[in-house]
Image (spheres, rainbow, N blue to C red):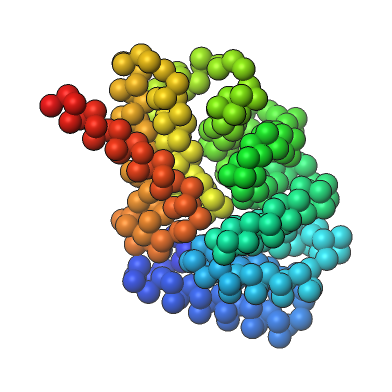
């Protein structure tokens, strides 16, 4: 029910925020009364994720602090995964890190990212790649935004890409698969700009020229982007960086056209203006807003120059 509600299937969009908060509040109270830490922890994690997505960052942190009082990764993680397919309690650490960023407490956010890498991830089943992706996703962007893209790429490869290749291979599938290649490309491009990668893999231009590699439905962008960024958000930034790295006017036009299209759809998902009536998602908006603004300015300049 909560999943359907989150994606606009159970109520009028104007009632979505109040309905979500009411539903999750009831879930927390009921599971607290029941007393099982597995379900109570899951409810608190749901409350934390919901408050984070709806911009109620202080409330999300409060839920997480309650969660920490009852959640024991050694005792509860396996049971939570058995009940809910992935460890939603562990995943809430990443959402809380995002909240601290939004509250201007980056040091606390980075402390949580350290905890996720060094204490949570070593205890997660590497075969459960979806769970791993959900756990590290927020940290990737926090590290990148704080000059640690190299760490982001290393963690992403170690806990997500390499286990996926080992256990599932090229024909495997997982919900976050549409983000795998875009994240790897964007982190590598970031390192190139920082001078930590010397040679640009020219094949990334062909990847970015084919917009179908990252263009997806609004619902898919919303679902994957709820952890921070969706494929179109990442793809738009790839196009922007590659636009700046080439002098070929034909390449620049394709990259700009694709980037603008991806950024416009992506921003509509997180700024509250999408057709599904979803509320503004502050974390996703923060990641994409500057990219969206720059791409559209370049596009407008090109149009003015051409006219």
The location of residue 293, given as percent across then percent down, is 35, 43
The location of residue 197, given as percent across then percent down, is 63, 22
Q: Please state which of residues 250 and 31 is positioned toward the viewer in this rendering.
A: 250
Q: Please state which of residues 114 and 217 is positioned toward the viewer in this rendering.
A: 114
Q: Which residue lies furthest to the left in this view?
A: 307
The location of residue 208, given as percent across then percent down, is 44, 25
Count of numbered tags = 0
Residue 92 seen in render = yes
Q: Residue at x 37, y 33 (%)?
A: 259
Q: Please state which of residues 250 and 13 is positioned toward the viewer in this rendering.
A: 250
| Vertical side of 51 occupied by 232: above or below | above
| Quadrant in the picture for the C terminus | top left
Q: Going by the image, does 236 lie left or right of 2?
A: left
The location of residue 47, given as percent across then percent down, is 59, 71
Residue 295, image quadrant? top left
| Vertical side of 214 occupied by 117: above or below | below
Q: Going by the image, does 165 lie left or right of 200?
A: right
| Vertical side of 287 occupied by 204: above or below | above
Q: Which residue is drawn at 63% across and 40% down?
A: 147
Q: Residue at x 75, y 35 (%)?
A: 158
Residue 233, image quadrant? top left
Q: Residue at x 45, y 21 (%)?
A: 245
Q: Please state which of residues 154 and 1 is positioned toward the viewer in this rendering.
A: 154
Residue 4 seen in render = no
Q: Going by the image, does 148 lie left or right of 294?
A: right
């Amino acid at each position: 029910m909560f999943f359907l509600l989150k994606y606009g299937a159970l109520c009028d969009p104007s009632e979505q925020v109040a309905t979500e908060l009411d539903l999750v509040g009831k879930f927390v109270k009921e599971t607290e009364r029941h007393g099982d830490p597995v379900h109570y922890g899951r409810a608190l994690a749901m409350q934390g994720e919901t408050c984070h997505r709806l911009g109620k960052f202080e409330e999300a942190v409060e839920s997480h602090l309650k969660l920490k009082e009852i959640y024991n990764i050694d005792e509860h993680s396996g049971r939570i995964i058995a009940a809910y397919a992935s460890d939603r309690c562990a995943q809430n650490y990443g959402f809380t890190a995002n909240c601290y960023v939004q509250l201007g407490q980056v040091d606390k956010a980075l402390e949580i990212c350290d905890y996720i890498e060094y204490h949570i991830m070593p205890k997660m089943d590497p075969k459960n790649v979806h769970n791993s992706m959900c756990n590290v996703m927020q940290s990737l962007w926090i590290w990148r935004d704080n000059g640690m893209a190299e760490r982001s790429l290393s963690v992403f490869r170690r806990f997500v890409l390499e286990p996926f290749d080992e256990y599932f291979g090229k024909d495997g599938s997982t919900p976050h698969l549409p983000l795998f290649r875009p994240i790897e490309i964007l982190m590598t491009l970031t390192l190139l700009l920082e001078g930590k990668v010397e040679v640009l893999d020219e094949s990334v231009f062909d990847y970015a020229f084919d917009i179908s590699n990252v263009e997806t439905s609004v619902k898919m962008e919303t679902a994957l982007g709820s952890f921070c960024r969706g494929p179109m958000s990442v793809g738009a930034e790839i196009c922007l960086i590659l636009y700046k790295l080439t002098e070929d006017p034909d390449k620049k036009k394709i990259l700009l056209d694709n980037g603008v299209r991806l950024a416009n759809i992506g921003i509509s998902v997180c700024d509250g203006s999408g057709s599904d009536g979803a509320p503004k998602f502050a974390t996703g908006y923060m990641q994409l807003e500057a990219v969206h603004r720059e791409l559209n300015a370049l596009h407008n300049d090109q149009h003015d120059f051409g006219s």
